[in-house]
Amino acid sequence: MLTPTDLQRQTLRLYGELVARRPGYGGQLVFTCGDACSATGLPVAVSIAGGTTLALDPDASAVKATFRQGGIDFVVNTLDEALRVLKNEVRQHKPLGVGLIADVQRVLAEMAARGVLPDLYVSLDAPSDLLFVASEPSEGIGKEHLHLTRSEGIAAPTPQLTAWLAGHNWSEYIHPSTPENPLRTLDAQLLAGLPQDDAVRRTWLQRISHYQRPTPGGSRVLWLNPASQP
C-alpha cells in the first residue's frame, strides 16, 4: 500500500504524464485495468486534467476504499452501467472517474465485441499486491497506449515527462504541513505564489484535495522552480 504522500506523488506524476502529451482531456476516455488499478491515483490525475476514466478493477475492496477516499466518483458492476454513467460526461467534457468491479479478461472481450475503444490506455507495472496489467497486447484496448513502470515504489517519470518538466524548470517538491500551517492554509499560500496564467499547477492545487482528502500531518506535493523551493 502506498502512503498518502507517495500516492499523491504518484498522482502528480501521472497528471504530468497526461498534460505533457496534450493540453486538455475534456471529452477523452482513459482506460486502465488490473488488480487495484483504481487505487493508483490515475483516475484522480485524469479528472484533474479534465477527462474521464474507466478503471476495470477486480479488487472490490480497493475500488470501494478509493471511492470512500474520493478517488473515483462511481462504483459499478457491469460495462453497461459504466458506459451509461460515462456517456454524458464524455459528451459534455466533464471529468469523472468510474470503477468497474469485474473480471478483466471478460470485460476486455466485451469491450472488443462492442467496439468500445478508449482514447488512451494506461498500464502501470507493479507488484501483484498493487496492480496486475492484463498480459494481452494493448492493440484494440485504446487508440493510444501509455506504458509506465515503477521506481522506488511509485510511477517513474518517462523521458517525455522529464523533458517537459525540464523545459519549465520545474522539479518535484514535498511541502509538509504543520499544526500552525495546516494543509488548506498551505495550499492557499502555494496558490497565491503561482502565476495567474499557470493553469497546470493552479488546477492541480485547486482540485487535488477534493479527490485525495487531506489527512492530519499531511503534505502537498507540487512542481516548483528550484530557486523558489523553501
Image (cartoon, rainbow, N blue to C red):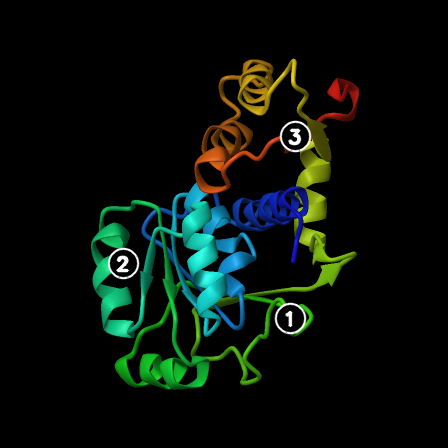
At a point 58% along the width and 50% down the height, the residue shown is: 14
Nearer to the camera, 24 or 56: 56
- Spatial CA distance of label 1 from label 3 is 27 Å
Q: Nearer the viewer, mark 2 or mark 1?
A: 1
> Is disc 3 surrounded by few (<14), some (14 to 19) or many (20+) residues within 10 Å?
few
Q: Amino acid at mark 2?
A: Leu
Q: How many marks?
A: 3
Mark 2 near mark 3, Cβ–Cβ under 8 Å? no
Neighbours of disc 2 within 10 Å: few (<14), some (14-19), many (20+): many
Where disc 3 sits, the SS reads loop
Q: Picture coordinates of residue 171 (x, y %)? A: 73, 35
Q: Residues within 10 Å of mark 1 (few under 14, many from 20)?
A: few
Mark 3 — residue? 217
Residue 24 visible within the image: no
Instruction: Say what secondary structure mark 1 lies in.
Output: loop
User: Label 3 sits on what residue type?
Assistant: Gly
Residue positioned 46% across, 47% down in the render: 69
Examine the image and state in which quarter residue 148 appears: bottom right
Q: Which mark is residue 129?
A: 1
In the image, what residue occupies the spot 20% across and 53% down?
88
**Viewed as shown, does residue 88 lie left or right of 181?**
left
Q: Position of residue 49 (x, y in %)?
A: 45, 43
Q: Is residue 25 above or below residue 209?
A: below
In primary-sequence order, the first of circles 1 and 3 is 1
Q: Whole-Å distance between the Cαs marked 2 and 3?
A: 35 Å
> Dividing the image into 4 quarters, which one contains the C terminus?
top right
Disc with the residue nearer the chain's start (2 vs 3): 2
**In front of the other: label 1 or label 3?**
3
Residue 109 locus on image (x, y percent) = 37, 86
Q: In the image, which disc is placed on residue 50?
A: none
Disc 2 marks which residue? 86
